[in-house]
């Protein structure tokens, strides 16, 4: 390929993509359809919306889900700093003359990434409370090419599994009680009390198990909240360096009185200083570091608790991992159907380099 700019643009998109690979797959399907029908890729409106449907059909099969990002976020794949139509058209010409080699490159890159995910999944599933090490698990996401972008989600999962396990073990309860005894008010707002508070007339107090809830799978990096609780604080997990702007955005963007931040040890003092500087002490309930997490993991997995907390913790970790990350059985049959498995890639298109 004489002009390497289209490939550089594609590689950047692949490098930035999480394991779900929505944007690279969208590009691959545009190239596939362009190769098999007359399609002028310089005219974006010919395929802007259709390409999302093509992508969703493939992602549903290969990774079991479709993109739920905003239309604006999905469309920025065609921005000047991503894959604008003129670069896509150049990529398409090379792809056509080389029998779909760019499509194969994208899907083989996905295959490579899914195999690394499988390695992580296998490590978790083969671990026991005696052998599991949190630091070893997180290190895989730092060391493995192609997984760094998903490290924040793995970090979030490890936090959620730990917190949920401990909260359940503590048998913590949350009590909702109506303090107003005015019978007229209670009668007038009986429907509200039942639907919103979950209380029946005459029963002005109820206790429920304390629970945590992950906000859900996200397709783009964000500074939004990661976990909700029914006992007060919301939880923000960050494995990356927090800037003053990010701390302020966290506090401004979350409508809760109490926020718990989970971060790297090296960030704690800086965050405390920022919190004080920004006058946010009243809203930050606490800061938890990786050392804290490792200590609690070791405690749960220790001989003292491994038959109870340890086993539960690993089950929660496996469940959340499977919910978050694809473990496709369809990628190899798909590569074979399309003929990508037998299509050799040029040296400069080595998928392990991405």
Image (spheres, rainbow, N blue to C red):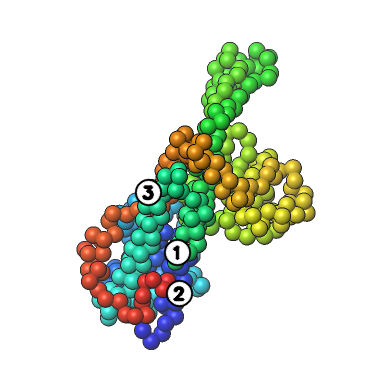
Q: Nearer the viewer, residue 319 or 339?
A: 319
Q: Which mark is residue 144?
A: 1
Sequence-wise first label, 2 or 3: 2
Q: Quadrant of the C terminus?
A: bottom left
Counting labels gives 3
Mark 1: secondary structure? loop
- The residue beneath circle 2 is 9
Q: Give the side of residue 322 with respect to residue 32, left or right.
A: right
Q: Residue at x 50, y 42 (%)?
A: 301
Q: How far is disc 3 from disc 1 in space, using C-alphas? A: 19 Å
Label 1 CA crowd tier, 10 Å (few <14, some 14–19, many 20+): few
Q: Are marks 2 and 1 in contact (CB under 8 Å)?
A: no
Q: Position of residue 18 (x, y in %)?
A: 45, 60
Q: Nearer the viewer, mark 2 or mark 1?
A: 1
Q: Using the rendered image of the protein, determine whether residue 79 is visible from the camera's viewpoint.
A: yes
Q: Residue at x 68, y 18 (%)?
A: 180
Q: Quadrant of residue 84 in the image?
A: bottom left
Q: Position of residue 200 (x, y in %)?
A: 55, 17
- The residue beneath circle 3 is 126
């Amino acid at each position: 390929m004489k002009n390497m700019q289209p490939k550089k643009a594609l590689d950047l998109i692949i490098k930035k993509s999480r394991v779900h690979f929505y944007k690279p797959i969208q590009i691959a399907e545009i190239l596939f359809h362009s190769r098999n029908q007359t399609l002028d890729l310089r005219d974006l409106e010919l395929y802007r919306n259709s390409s999302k449907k093509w992508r969703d059909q493939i992602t549903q099969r290969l990774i079991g889900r479709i993109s739920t990002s905003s239309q604006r976020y999905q469309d920025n794949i065609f921005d000047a700093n991503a894959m604008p139509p003129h670069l896509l058209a150049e990529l398409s010409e090379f792809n056509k003359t080389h029998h779909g080699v760019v499509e194969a490159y994208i899907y083989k890159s996905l295959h490579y990434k899914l195999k690394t995910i499988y390695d992580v999944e296998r490590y978790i599933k083969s671990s026991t409370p005696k052998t599991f090490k949190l630091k070893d698990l997180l290190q895989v996401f730092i060391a493995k090419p192609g997984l760094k972008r998903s490290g924040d989600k793995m970090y979030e999962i490890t936090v959620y599994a730990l917190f949920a396990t401990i909260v359940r073990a503590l048998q913590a309860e949350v009590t909702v009680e109506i303090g107003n005894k005015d019978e007229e008010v209670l009668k007038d707002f009986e429907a509200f009390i039942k639907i919103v508070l979950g209380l029946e007339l005459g029963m002005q107090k109820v206790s429920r198990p304390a629970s945590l809830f992950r906000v859900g799978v996200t397709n783009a990096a964000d500074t939004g909240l990661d976990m909700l609780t029914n006992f007060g604080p919301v939880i923000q997990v960050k494995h990356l360096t927090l800037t003053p702007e990010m701390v302020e955005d966290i506090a401004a963007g979350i409508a809760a009185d109490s926020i718990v931040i989970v971060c790297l040890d090296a960030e704690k003092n800086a965050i405390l200083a920022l919190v004080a500087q920004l006058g946010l002490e009243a809203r930050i309930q606490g800061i938890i570091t990786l050392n804290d997490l490792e200590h609690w993991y070791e405690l749960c997995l220790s001989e003292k608790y491994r038959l109870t907390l340890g086993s539960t913790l690993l089950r929660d970790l496996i469940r959340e991992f499977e919910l978050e990350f694809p473990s496709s059985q369809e990628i190899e049959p798909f590569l074979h159907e399309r003929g990508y498995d037998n299509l050799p890639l040029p040296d400069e298109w080595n998928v392990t380099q991405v």
